[in-house]
Amino acid sequence: MNSSWITIAILGLIAHWSMALPDTVKIGGLFEASEELDMMAFRQSVNKINMDRTILPRTKLVAQPNIVTRHDSFTVADKVCNLLGMKVIGIFGPSSEFTSEDVESICDTMEIPHVETRWDLYQRRGTMLLNLLPYPPAMAKVYVDLVKAWKWKQFTVIYENDDGLVRLSELLKMYDPKGYTVTVRQLDDEDGNYRHVLRKIKRSGETNIVLDCSIDILYEVLKQAQQVGLMASHHNYIITNPDLHTLDLEPFQYGGTNITGVQLIDPADPLVNTTLNEWRDFERAGKGRMDSGYHNITPSTLRMGTALMYDAVQLFGRALHQLDSSQHVAIKPLDCFTQGNWEHGFSLINFMRVSEMKGLSGAIHFDNQGFRTNFVLNIVELTEYGLIQIGTWNSTEGLNLTRSHATDGISMDVGEHMESLQNKTFVVLTALSPPYGYLKHSAAKLSGNDRFEGFGIDLIHEVSLLLGFNYTFKIQHDGVYGSLNRKTGQWNGMIRELMDYRADLAITDLTITYDREGAADFTMPFMNLGISILYKKPTKEPPSLFSFLSPFSREVWMYMLAAYLGVSILLFFMARISPAEWNNPYPCIEEPDTLENQFSLKNSLWFTIGSLMQQGSEIAPIGVSTRMVAGIWWFFTLIMVSSYTANLAAFLTVESMSSPIKSAEDLAKQNVIKYGAKRDGSTAAFFRDSNYSTYQRMWDFMINNPDVFTSSNDEGVNRVKNSNGKYAFLMESTSIEYVVERECDVSQVGGLLDAKGYGIAMRKDSSYRNALSAAVLKLQEVGKLYALKVKWWKEKRGGGACRDDASKGSGAASELGLPNVGGVFVVLIGGVALACIIAWLELIYKVAMNSIKNRTPFWPEIKDEIRFVFKCHGSTKPVRKKDDEKEEKSGAEEEMGEEVAADFIPLSPYATPYGYVKKERMT
Ligand code: GLU
């Protein structure tokens, strides 16, 4: 029983041994001469499998590496056929796309697994092919994710050959006219000189670059980029080559350039370290060639290709073990020229596809199409300490950054900014525009920032003290601040300098405008202002012949004339109405026949003019009403004459100061005085863009007379001073304030045409904008900005020179209008109206008394009186008598006869009852 069991066991064992792999199994490798390290990794991986009996317990692998030439398809095919004839059951490599297709087709025919580790853009699930390098379209996603994470809106792709372009096709697809701007440039190799294309990129102002090139030229490209100035602190690179870490990046790590790369190999992975130590031990033990170079390989110089070759062999060994465990594996030599194949090839490659293992290149998995999947890439960034890992990316979860990029810091608070600005050095652009920037006067030779002083210089200094940054001043020599050329869409001046990264900040009297906000960022305004006119100060002119009319407006003069005539006529009528004004012309006759009135029209006019001229007349009113009119008139004249006298004094002191223009409207209306503004400045832009017809007219005038533009405010001021009133300069109010403190023969004319502010400019989307704004606000709140303004406007560099002039005769006298003296007219009208009423009452009273006394009817008499008043002529009237006296009178008149009567005229149509007045006396 026992012996039968033993027999069965021995037979089973024999059967098993007869199914098993041979003791040695050969695998072939195809390497180019330059791929010595890959070849060694191939060998080393075979050694590792042979030493580790858990992988292939009973079989030893034999490595058959071969050196091939890159473009020599014939030799490569020959070598593969030789290998197959030597019973090789797996081919690794080559890396050249020119020869690998031939190898693949032989392997397909012979059903021998073909393992690749090369970039294969057209990677497909070949029947016998397996590539350990991740599928390129999957890799391309990492670059897209990085571009999005870094918030690049435009970038330039630099590629070496068409493969690179296909590799980055996902990035190119990001182009969108309304979103991403993608520029593509090829590194045209002129004997290793790439400066031409790099310079072009620099000139374009591009700062975001995706660089795709082989590791062999990568260092040279970076070096040349640095030489042409394409590696400044504002430049950002994404380098697609996964072997970036194997280069010596020390020359590039201190410039502040943001260089991001990806790695398939994690140098910190313990497996990488252990494996490299094993390689070195192997070399030391004398099992490898002493010149093998293993000792040079460190985790940070291990190239991806080398690691993948090692992993490929490891994967092969494990799959072979599985194949061995599942079926009888026979190996026979194959001949390329006869029809034959290895029947286990398919199974072996399928075992490789379903195997999972951890290698030097991370976890190795393949998807159902045979493409490597679930791989993890390290995202690394170059810092002054070398490359550091800042996150990972995997094909399922995407990007996982442990630290955000520098340009994401916009929402940081001031405190954080203070830290981030601490050790920065900004290039601050300024212009020599007083009082914002001057060259310092000094006997000693000054250098650096010491050469400059001014409001802008002090302001930057104060801000730097708050935020802790360093700065270097740079001068905008042409003094152009920046305007947009609407035809070319190009900016000039300081704004252009910022955009082209030739400066980080710009400070001067730089106005924040809508256009500029589109091209640059500004801090909160540190000064508010508006456009006004600088013009020659009004000069003294000879007094005008009729300057005595100035104290009153024309309107008041007209009203005065009307008042004079009105009061005179009213006085005339009132005197006729008022009985008290009819007096006995011959005091020696007790009972005169006629009464006389002194207020004839002529006398009335004379009386009022006499009062107005403060001279009086012999005529004096007697009746209540006439006295009242006279009193009111005298009051009126008193006020008017004193107002006139007071205002005349003021007018005589200022009447000579006159200016032909008082506002922009005055300028626009005339052509004699030319006017202009600073070229390419915000004032010119204001007129250019204004919709208001006056300003449009002014802009038309300016562009039709281009000589009116100046290159600086100083030039404008000099032109105003020297033009003898023929030129006015449109200038900002703060600058005018500065000028009129020092130049006493010019002054501001009119008010402000707009309202705006000056700010510190910086590049668009600058991360330090908030911090700078906060610092400006702080300086404003603590009164530092005001103190600086007083210092540079009123104290330094000749400030206050015109202060005496300003206090002299600065008050202007203005003529008195109706609103000033209207009340006097009202009193006059009121008084005269009251006097009229009183005059009528007087008359009524007198007539009533007469009718009682003389027993005559009231109404006919009052009617007679009224008729007499409105007859408007005659200043003599008969005295009313009793009826018997009248009869005596009429008898006497009859005696006088026709002849006598002809010399008399009746006093009124009703004169008969009262008698006659001799003609001569009626004059
Ligand atoms: N502040 C102006 C500017 O920023 C320059 C002077 C002006 O145009 O009046 O362009």
Image (cartoon, rainbow, N blue to C red):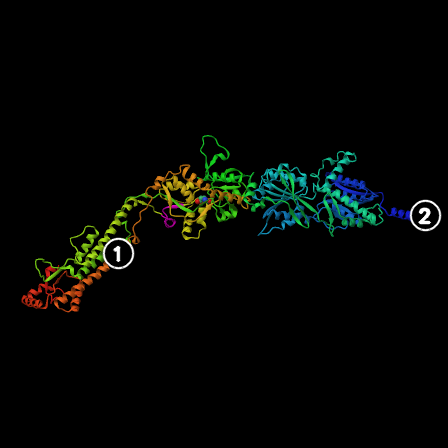
Front residue of 624 and 633: 624
Identify the amino acid type marked 2: Ser
Point out the frontmost of discs 2 and 1: 1
Q: Position of residue 564 (x, y in %)?
A: 22, 55
Q: Position of residue 559 (x, y in %)?
A: 26, 55
Which is nearer the N-term, disc 2 or disc 1? 2
Helix, strand or loop at label 1? It is helix
Q: Residue at x 25, y 49 (%)?
A: 642
- Residue assigned mark 1: 827
* Residue 548 placement, left or right of 687: left
Q: Residue at x 40, y 39 (%)?
A: 794
Q: Is residue 140 magenta?
A: no
- Residue assigned mark 2: 3
Front residue of 648 and 850: 850
Residue 493 is at least partly visible in this image: no
Residue stretch in magenta = 662-675
Ligand 1 quarter of the rendering: top left
Front residue of 795 and 153: 795
* Label 1 Cα neighbours within 10 Å, binned few <14 / some 14-19 / many ≥20: some
Residue 260 is at least partly visible in this image: yes
Q: Where 909 sits versus 816, above or below?
A: below
The residues bearing labels 2 and 1 have C-alpha atoms spaced at a distance of 155 Å
